[in-house]
Image: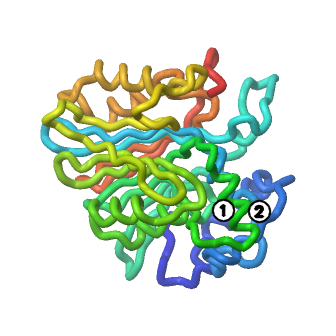
């Protein structure tokens, strides 16, 4: 799909919504409503369904940026969503995850008939979780579990304290407005958020890849590719990279094992896809896999299904 940013926000989404109306309605059925008029009020008039905010607290993902021997950067991600939101015992799948898969779309956002950025998104959702500014940078967002988490920020927002930004709207703003890897890194590190997050950012030059670990207020750590230290990739799930992941949810260890076995000399979109297809990196929550190569302006996505036996998460 192509979204024309020159159109009024209330008009630009119509082609997608017209095509995906039935799927969006099925997804929204039964959801409570929540006002988001404060942000993107023209794009989301009046009240919108909870669909547009629950990504702030329910995403469980794997993202990585890797550099090959020629200095090219490949950015990959699995978007896992729907944890504890209804398990279908008959089909051994998560109910929300399966409803989301038909909503996955690739979008080319244009202004003046020229691409501003590309993204993989869900129809009906106006934030951005996965995107690329061609020949400039790539960006994905993972949830960061914290006691001072997204629930607190959302409650504060509902009560009128609105000095923090929805993290997926920050991602969208950076994709639309930042012009370089360094500018994107500064914005992602310094903007106050409603929820803690990990921003995984890739650039267009050697060593331009990092994981930005965020609290709601500030950047706690920026972990970068460092070839001098032998670190040719950075990989993030949903736990601080300097701490061990929860033993019940360790996608990091098998993913890093696969990356190390692949070796830098064999890195490509295909081999990154293979890493992201390894169980439990691929699991019953995985809705899509996206692969991005900024130097070529390539963004490609695949709707995923994890064949049994497969971990629920």
Q: How is the image coloured?
A: rainbow
CA neighbours of label 2 inside 10 A, class few (<14), some (14 to 19), many (20+): many
Residue 179 vertical placement versus 285 (above, below): below
Q: Using the image, determine if residue 97 lies above or below residue 164.
A: above
Give SS at disc 1.
loop
List the residue tagged with mark 1: 124
Name the residue beneath numbered marker 2. 49
In percent of width and height, residue 273 lies at: 40, 33
Residue sitting at x 53%, y 39%: 61
Residue 37 quadrant:
bottom right
The residue shown at (57%, 76%) is: 12
Question: Where residue 67 appears, x then y in whole percent?
Answer: 23, 39
Count numbered badges in the picture: 2
Quarter-of-image position of residue 146: top right
Q: Where is residue 95 in the image (x, y as percent from the top left)?
A: 76, 37
Which label sits in the foreground, 2 or 1? Answer: 2
Instruction: State the CA–CA distance, disc 2 to disc 1.
Output: 10 Å
């Amino acid at each position: 799909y192509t979204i024309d940013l020159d159109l009024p926000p209330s008009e630009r989404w119509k082609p997608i919504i017209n095509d995906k109306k039935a799927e969006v309605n099925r997804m929204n059925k039964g959801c409570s409503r929540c006002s988001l008029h404060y942000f993107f009020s023209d794009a989301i008039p009046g009240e919108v369904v909870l669909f547009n905010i629950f990504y702030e607290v329910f995403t469980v993902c794997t993202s990585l940026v890797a550099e090959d021997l020629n200095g090219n950067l490949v950015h990959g991600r699995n978007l896992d969503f729907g944890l504890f939101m209804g398990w279908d015992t008959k089909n051994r799948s998560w109910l929300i995850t399966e409803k989301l898969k038909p909503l996955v779309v690739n979008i080319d956002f244009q202004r003046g008939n020229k691409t501003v950025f590309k993204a993989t998104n869900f129809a009906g959702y106006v934030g951005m979780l996965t995107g690329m500014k061609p020949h400039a940078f790539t960006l994905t967002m993972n949830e960061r579990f914290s006691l001072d988490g997204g629930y607190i920020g959302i409650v504060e927002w509902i009560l009128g304290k609105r000095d923090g930004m929805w993290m997926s709207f920050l991602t969208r703003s950076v994709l639309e407005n930042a012009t370089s890897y360094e500018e994107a890194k500064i914005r992602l590190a310094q903007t106050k958020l409603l929820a803690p997050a990990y921003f995984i950012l890739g650039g267009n030059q050697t060593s331009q890849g990092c994981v930005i670990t965020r609290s709601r207020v500030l950047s706690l750590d920026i972990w970068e590719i460092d070839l001098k230290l032998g670190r040719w990739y950075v990989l993030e799930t949903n736990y601080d990279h300097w701490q061990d992941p929860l033993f019940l949810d360790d996608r990091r260890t098998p993913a890093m094992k696969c990356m190390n076995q692949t070796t830098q000399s064999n890195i490509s979109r295909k081999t990154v896809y293979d890493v992201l297809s390894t169980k439990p990196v691929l699991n019953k929550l995985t809705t899509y896999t996206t692969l991005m190569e900024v130097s070529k302006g390539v963004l490609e996505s695949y709707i995923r299904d994890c064949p049994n036996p497969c971990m629920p998460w």
